[in-house]
Amino acid sequence: MKKIYLVEDDENLNLILSSYLEREGFIVNSFLNGIDAKKNIPNPPDLWILDIMLPDIDGYRLIKEIKNTTPGVPIIFISARDADIDRVLGLELGCDDYLPKPFLPRELIIRTKNILDRYKKDEAVEDKIGTYKIDRGSRIVKKNNEPIKLTSKEYNLLLYFLENIGLAVSREQILDFIWEEDYFGSDRVVDDLVRRLRKKMEDLNIETLYGYGYRMVSDEK
């Protein structure tokens, strides 16, 4: 059974969401504040559902600590504040999904299952390209046995390139794969994501196809 950590300071909403998740067969540990949630970061769940507006610790700070300690654990974050700002900041910090309040509990269930199904497909699969090893089960990337810290979006981009190695992929294709239907704006966000991946994994051979997109090629003969 999958374990979920739910961090929501509204006690009534916390109870409602916990009930829906448990009804679907998930084990739910719920927290009403960031301090209690922070204590449990070293014992990670299969998924975090995290409210940005907490009474003690800023939700973004909590996201950073989760990703620094357990970079492979997915996060859905929820917020009642400015939707555009929260969505962009959360996704830049490596969150996997975003839900603005108010939302239907059923929508949260669907998004939770989709993310967990996506991660399950990666279990027990290891890839190797050049000097890098990618453990899909833990979503950990290593070079010479040293881990490389990637955000969820950077990691997903790496997987997309691996699954399409040697093929030209457009910015639009990358947007559809990484952001699905959750992004509205310039496709230049792809360029920024590629730039960050190149900086962290300098040995990757990612070619720029001007006016179109990118192609990752293997240097192995």
Image (cartoon, rainbow, N blue to C red):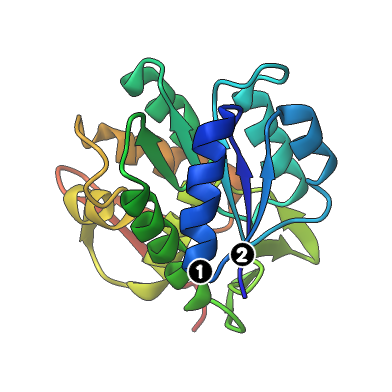
Measured from the top left, where is residue 151 in percent x and y? 56, 45
Which residue was labeled with disc 2? Answer: 139
* Helix, strand or loop status at disc 1: helix
Q: Which amino acid, by three-letter code, is at mark 1?
A: Tyr
80 or 66, nearer to the observer: 80
Q: Residue at x 52, y 54 (%)?
A: 19
Q: Residue at x 32, y 21 (%)?
A: 84
Look at the image and tell me whether residue 93 can be seen.
Answer: no
6 or 63, nearer to the observer: 6
Q: Quadrant of residue 206?
A: bottom left
Which image quarter holds the N terminus? Answer: bottom right
State the separation of the CA atoms marked 2 and 1: 9 Å
Disc 2 crowd, CA 10 A, few/some/many (<14, 14-19, 20+): many
- 3 displayed left or right of 174: right
- 116 displayed left or right of 99: right
Measured from the top left, where is residue 155 in percent x and y? 51, 56
Mark 2 and mark 1 in contact? Answer it, CB < 8 Å. yes
Look at the image and tell me whether residue 115 can be seen.
Answer: yes
* Helix, strand or loop status at disc 2: loop
Q: Which amino acid, by three-letter code, is at mark 2?
A: Arg
Disc 1 crowd, CA 10 A, few/some/many (<14, 14-19, 20+): some
Which residue was labeled with disc 1? Answer: 119
Q: Residue at x 62, y 84 (%)?
A: 124
197 or 17, nearer to the observer: 17
